[in-house]
């Protein structure tokens, strides 16, 4: 199999789906998803050469896990490599690499000297050509980022798409019995490693969202009439501020794409409407009116529109309106009810939770409601969040009973559903921006 | 016989642990009141003294239930709230928090709003029966505080509730 054909196929798969928003591309999307002829690209990742060989092996393993975890790559078993340690400064012996079955090989080094520095070359074994050559560095305290940046370089080189590995996910870490569960905010690398807790669990915290620059985390504290509401945590200095007290309860905070505004829900009596205000503070502006429940707002990539959930027509459905309010149009028309719409950072798709036939589903549709596709279905699945490249979703599933929720990821073609390993239960994932 | 003693002790230890867990659960609850504890087994504490929270819990009933995705008060719910109203008018020393809850068959944020809508339905009904608005406040817990843990319909219905919590 010719690697260029494979690479072209990968790129076609990605761009075919990217055309979903155009409407007529539905057939192409189907070809991509149901074709069954998508074969993950075989790739070899030798250990990174390093003054500390164990470190070089550790970094390479994170890269391998990232690439295979994307579902787009198949790792050639390192036991069969012609060389165990990569060298970014030498041309690989392409004949030897081709016999392993690898279409691409990653040759890299990594060294610690105050900072961590790494160089990487990605080679096409069939054509005998370099695909990508990069070098980069991070603080010594953030060694996993080197592995994530290397992974993004490989992903971008072979798919033509922006990567998503060098990113973090904030989520709710849950523990204890269901009726009295401790809910703490935590942040982790997108692969589930490197978990750090952001709140102490004294007060239950839910629905976190990261600002577009990844430095602020807005969330809801959920603890009775006195202390419930929206708070904003500055990840750099650990300080938390209340956004303010509005109505009987405010919740569902979402940042605008420029980070300057936060949209959220305010409950007054039986009514819940959407408001927005400056992240820096000030008076909130009411965006929706009426006696329905309007919640789960999400800004479009250009900030001009808001998608949200409302039961103004009976059951919860998805509507799109101008971000300043007005002209709301319903876009969801399938069976059941639709919740938690989230606009893709690329702008081409809206992900949602749907309840239908006694199941919860995670799906995507174009912003005009066309091309709806259900990606995953189970007893309970909720709250999709987009990877920064708009090609992968994370969400949570809960089996019910005394069990608790776990995080899952899936690509927008409905392939490669994977559980993200976390210690204890986890819910409400919110993906942050690409850090590099 | 000798061999049963350690077993008995072990059993007691378990009971202690269970009680500690229950106490810990209550301690974390911000509003003090009977609503978060639930009815004990028959005879435990009896009906409670007249005007006590225990009496309200046992003789009146502290909660009403709702249909799926609904905040309409059923006739059962209205009957319970009428009893609550009579009792609350007799014992006017209590302030009242109505907690609205939802079952797990909805999304987190929508359920927060749904719980608020249920709590408001209860408040409006109690006000219509003569309870001063000033004694009443609401809070929604969405689906975050279920009382019944399982994954079938009989269980979900117990979690779709509004609980009348008395505070001094």
Image (cartoon, helix red, strand yellow):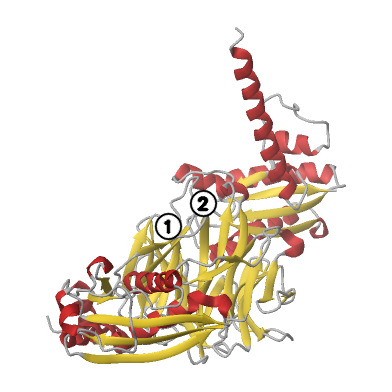
How many numbered marks does the figure carry? 2
Name the element at disc 1.
loop
Residue B151 lies, in percent from the top left, at: 45, 46
Q: Which numbered dot is residue B70?
A: none
Between residue B84 and residue A242, name the one nearer to us: A242
Q: Quadrant of residue A292?
A: bottom right
Could you say whether the residue bearing mark 2 is in a helix, strand or loop? loop
* Within-10-Å neighbours for mark 2: few <14, some 14–19, many 20+: few
Whether residue A195 sits left or right of residue A99 in the image: it is right
Q: Which residue is mark 1?
A: A380
Q: Nearer the viewer, residue A311 or A303?
A: A303
Q: Chain of mark 1?
A: A
A430 w.r.t. A367: above or below: above
Label 2 sits on residue:
B67
User: Residue placed at 19% from the left, 75% from the top?
Assistant: A38
Dot 1 and dot 2 within a common chain: no
Q: Nearer the viewer, mark 1 or mark 2?
A: 1
Image quarter for residue A297? bottom right
Instruction: Specify whether residue A190 is in view.
Output: yes
Disc 1 and disc 2: Cα gap in Å?
19 Å
Residue B135: where, in percent of width, then height? 82, 56
Horizontal side, residue A102 vs residue A151: left or right = left
Taking the spot 69% from the left edge, 30% from the top edge, the residue there is: B16
Residue drawn at (64%, 55%) of the image: B100
Q: Residues within 10 Å of mark 1 (few under 14, many from 20)?
A: many
Above/below status of A279 relative to B128: below
Q: Chain of mark 2?
A: B
């Amino acid at each position: 199999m010719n690697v260029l054909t494979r690479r072209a196929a990968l790129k076609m798969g990605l761009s075919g789906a990217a055309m979903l928003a155009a409407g007529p591309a539905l057939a192409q999307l189907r070809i991509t998803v149901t074709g069954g002829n998508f074969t993950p690209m075989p790739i070899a990742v030798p250990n990174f050469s390093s003054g500390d060989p164990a470190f070089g092996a550790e970094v390479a393993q994170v890269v391998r896990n990232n690439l295979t975890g994307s579902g787009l790559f198949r790792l050639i078993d390192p036991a069969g490599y012609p060389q165990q340690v990569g060298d970014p400064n030498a041309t690989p012996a392409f004949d030897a690499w081709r016999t392993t079955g690898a279409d691409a090989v990653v040759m890299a080094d990594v060294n610690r000297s105050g900072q961590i520095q790494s160089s990487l070359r990605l080679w096409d074994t069939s054509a005998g050509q370099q695909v990508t050559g990069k070098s980069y560095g991070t603080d010594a305290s953030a060694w996993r980022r080197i592995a994530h940046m290397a992974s993004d370089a490989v992903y971008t080189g072979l798919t033509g798409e922006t990567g998503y590995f060098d990113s973090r996910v904030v989520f709710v870490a849950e523990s204890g019995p269901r009726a009295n569960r401790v809910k703490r905010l935590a942040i982790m690398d997108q692969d589930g490693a490197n978990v750090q807790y952001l709140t102490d669990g004294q007060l239950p915290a839910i629905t976190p969202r990261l600002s577009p620059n990844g430095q602020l985390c807005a969330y809801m504290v959920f603890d009775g009439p006195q202390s419930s509401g929206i708070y904003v945590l500055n990840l750099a200095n650990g300080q938390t501020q209340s956004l303010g007290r509005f109505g009987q309860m405010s919740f569902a905070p979402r940042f605008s794409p420029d980070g300057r505004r936060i949209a959220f829900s305010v409950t007054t009596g039986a009514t819940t409407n959407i408001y927005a205000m400056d992240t820096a503070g000030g008076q909130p502006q009411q965006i929706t009116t009426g006696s329905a429940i309007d919640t789960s707002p999400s800004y479009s990539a250009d900030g001009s529109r808001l998608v949200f959930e409302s039961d103004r027509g009976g059951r919860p459905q998805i509507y799109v309106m101008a971000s300043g309010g007005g002209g709301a149009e319903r876009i969801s028309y399938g069976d059941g009810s639709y919740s938690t719409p989230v606009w893709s950072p690329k702008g081409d798709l809206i992900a949602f939770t749907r309840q239908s036939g006694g199941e919860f589903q995670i799906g995507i549709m174009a912003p005009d409601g066309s091309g709806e596709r259900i990606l995953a279905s189970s007893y309970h699945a909720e709250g999709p969040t987009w990877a920064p490249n708009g090609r992968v979703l994370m969400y949570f599933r809960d089996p019910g009973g005394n069990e608790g929720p776990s995080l899952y990821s899936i690509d927008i073609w409905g392939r490669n559903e994977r559980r993200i390993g976390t210690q204890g239960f986890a819910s409400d994932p919110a993906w942050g921006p690409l850090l590099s | 016989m000798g061999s049963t003693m350690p077993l008995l002790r072990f059993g007691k230890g378990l009971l202690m642990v269970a009680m500690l867990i229950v106490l810990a659960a209550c301690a974390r609850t911000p509003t003090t009141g009977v609503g978060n504890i639930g009815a004990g087994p028959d005879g435990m504490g009896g009906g409670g003294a007249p005007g006590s929270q225990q009496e309200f819990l046992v003789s009146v009933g502290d909660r009403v239930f709702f249909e799926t995705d609904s905040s309409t008060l059923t006739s059962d719910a209205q009957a319970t709230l009428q009893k609550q109203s009579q009792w609350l008018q007799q014992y006017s020393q209590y302030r009242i928090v109505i907690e609205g809850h939802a079952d797990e068959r909805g999304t987190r944020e929508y359920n927060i709003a749904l719980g608020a809508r249920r709590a408001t339905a209860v408040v409006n009904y109690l006000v219509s029966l003569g309870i001063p608005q000033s004694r009443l406040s609401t809070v929604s817990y969405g689906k975050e505080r279920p009382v019944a843990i399982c994954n079938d319909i009989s269980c979900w219905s117990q979690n779709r509730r509004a609980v009348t919590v008395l505070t001094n």
